[in-house]
Amino acid sequence: ESPLEGLRVIDLADEKGELAGRILGDLGAEVIRVEPKAGAHSRCLPPFDSEGRSLYFAYRNANKLGLALDMESESDRERLVDLLSRADVLIESEKPGRMAELGLAPLALSDRFPHLIVLSISDFGQTGPYRDWVATDSTMCAVAGMQFKAGTADREPLFSPGAMCYDIAGIMGGARTGVSAETTDVLIEGACITEHKAHIVNFRRIPTDDVLIEGACSVEHFPHYFYRVFRIVVQKYT
């Protein structure tokens, strides 16, 4: 028997939070991925397989059922509300305020369905001075401090690998559904800062020739904290 067997999750998240539903599905929950009728934006994200299918989408949406709804349609929103009445968790990553515009504000849904946990994943949170700011995963890596681990001093600047901040937020969001009540607000920025804050402390003082250098960081002293990039050769076989 799986740990989350019997749990039903409605997953509206885009690429910023898709991994949360994947994790819950891996643990046995029934996850219904609701995407626009034109398909989720993450279906267009690389890398792609030989038939042009997005591996980004496939990896983060495994173990999910699928449903297409037009959130601009009142009848489709009613279908979604009917699903929520029989669900345990809702995951969404709309721009703050967008769910309220659709008549689906997280707090209103929690009042209507007391059993429902609503997980909202956004760039800078549902409230605060930066709530309306929009960022990419690479921007988040810089803002949250992740970029200091990408590459080494003798190389050109490098991005952190993959969709690191989005996936960190998805992992933390998935974990929060097990301990939260009603609504949970996961900030991608805050999730990434939380993930590596211990590393920042370790980098503040590094001994070099018996001298402590404030603010220094070194791949030689902490090799497992850095994301190295290697050149590879790809050969296609037929």
Image (cartoon, rainbow, N blue to C red):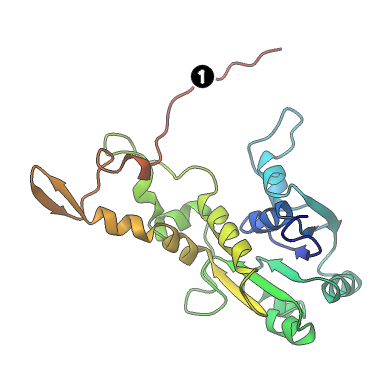
Q: Secondary structure at mark 1?
A: loop
| Residue that appears at 48% across and 74% down | 130
Amino acid beneath label 1: Val
**Other residues around mark 1 within 10 Å, as few (<14) / some (14–19) / many (≥20):** few
Q: Is residue 73 left or right of residue 42?
A: right
Badge 1 is on which residue? 233
Residue drawn at x 45%, y 45% as measured from the top left: 160
Q: Quadrant of the N terminus?
A: bottom right
Q: Which residue sits furthest bottom?
A: 111
Of all residues, the one furthest to the top in this rendering is 238
Q: At which x and y percent is residue 233?
A: 51, 19
Q: Position of residue 106 (x, y in %)?
A: 69, 79
Q: Residue at x 70, y 66 (%)?
A: 91
- Residue 30 lies left or right of residue 122; in this view the side is right
- Total marks shown come to 1
200 relative to 96, above or below: above
- Which corner quadrant of the image does residue 152 belong to? top left
